[in-house]
Amino acid sequence: MSAKKTDFTYWQDGGFWVGHLDEFPDYLTQGTSLDDLKENLIDLHRELTSGTIPNVRRHAELEVA
């Protein structure tokens, strides 16, 4: 199985790295390092796409003429 890629946004806030998956901007997570944040984002993606959490908000792009 090949690895899937997804975009994320992140920033440093004091001693923590904070971020969200671009597809799910309402759900923030943090880590003590950038690598820790990435691991937490992977866990968050797994939870949000599992179908077990109801009413998950998503971000998408719409092409209009």
Image (cartoon, rainbow, N blue to C red):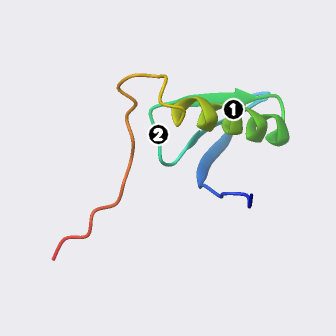
Q: Residue 39 location, x and y as percent?
A: 77, 37
Q: Quadrant of the C terminus?
A: bottom left
Q: Is residue 28 left or right of residue 34?
A: left
Q: From this view, report whether residue 21 is shown above or below residue 51.
A: below
Farthest-out residue, front: 1
Q: Residue at x 47, y 40 (%)?
A: 24
Q: Is residue 63 left or right of residue 5?
A: left
Q: Residue at x 69, y 32 (%)?
A: 43
Q: Residue at x 66, y 42 (%)?
A: 11
Classify mark 1: helix, strand or loop.
helix
Mark linked to residue 25: 2
Farthest-out residue, bottom: 65
Q: Look at label 1 and name its amino acid.
A: Asp
Label 1 crowd (10 A; few <14 / some 14-19 / many >=20): few
Which of the two labelled residues, at mark 2 and mark 1, occupies the earlier sequence position? 2
Q: Residue at x 52, y 32 (%)?
A: 48
Label 2 crowd (10 A; few <14 / some 14-19 / many >=20): some
- Gap in angstroms between the C-alphas marked 2 and 1: 15 Å
For residue 14, what is the image quadrant? Answer: top right
Q: Look at label 2 and name its amino acid.
A: Pro
Instruction: Please name whichever residue, 42 or 50, is drawn nearer the observer in this view of the structure.
Output: 50
Mark linked to residue 1: none
For residue 41, what is the image quadrant? Answer: top right
Q: Is residue 4 left or right of residue 65?
A: right
Query: Pointers 2 and 1 in contact (CB under 8 A)?
Result: no
Classify mark 2: helix, strand or loop.
loop
Q: From this view, report whether residue 3 is shown above or below residue 54.
A: below
- Circle 1 sits on which residue? 43
